[in-house]
Amino acid sequence: MTLEDRLGRQLLIEGWDQAYLKDSPITIIGDNKVDTSLFVLSASALGIDNQIVICPELDPKIKEIANNLNEDLKLTHLEGYFNYIGLTNMLRQSKVIIDFTNYSLSKKLLLEYSYKTNTPVILTKLKDRDTEIFVYQRGREYEELKRFVELPSFNYNYSKDPVSALVQSGLVLELTKDILMRKRVSEKIISH
């Protein structure tokens, strides 16, 4: 199946830049295999080919579907948690970083990296069925950021609703696409 066959509908959208999506590396940081894997799959379906993932585990079935859906997918998976400043070397090529973790150490490290490099970071917080999403770029030093860094410093066990994770993944994918295509994104926290 050619790229045009697979992505035909979105290629018809005025202003759509599939080549830029295809060539733009992104980094996905997670601590839960469900939401991280769902985002990898969604980004793969959108045609984002170069994905770096830092997460303890990806769902093998969802990962296989993502690879079958997008033959050009280049997925680099580092198994573990983003809890060490030295891991920021892996972020250098990324056009956008997506954080699905529910611990503040990751978010603090990413905010510092984003501030220094001006790389956009999409911060998420999902608890039960409530999600909050914020796009941080240098110059957006908002009081609301405290809501994202007041979580426990290290990973903790929590349960996530898979349907809410899917909704969150879709919202984050839309923001990722807009950032990669150089469109404006909301300056407010998105809550669902």
Image (cartoon, rainbow, N blue to C red):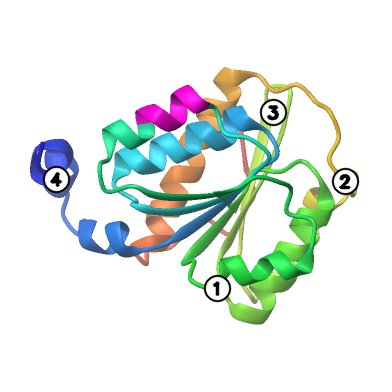
Please report contact status of discs 2 and 4: CB closer than 8 Å, yes or no: no
Front of the two marks 4 and 3: 4
* Residue visible at 22% across and 61% down in the picture: 19
Disc marking residue 3:
4
Instruction: Please give the residue where the numbered disc 3 appears in the rendered image.
Output: 130
Residue at disc 3, secondary structure? strand
Q: Which residues are magenta?
A: 60-65
- Above or below, comparing residue 111 to residue 150 in the picture: below
**Residue type indicated by callout 2:** Phe
* Residue visible at 49% across and 38% down in the picture: 39
Cα distance, mark 4 to mark 3? 35 Å
Disc marking residue 92:
1
In this picture, residue 47 sits left or right of residue 94: left
Please report contact status of discs 3 and 2: CB closer than 8 Å, yes or no: no
Residue at disc 1, secondary structure? loop
Q: Is residue 62 visible?
A: yes
Number of other residues with Cα within 10 Å of mark 2, as a class: few under 14, some 14 to 19, many 20 or more: some
**Residue type indicated by callout 3:** Asp
- Above or below, comparing residue 141 to residue 79 in the picture: below
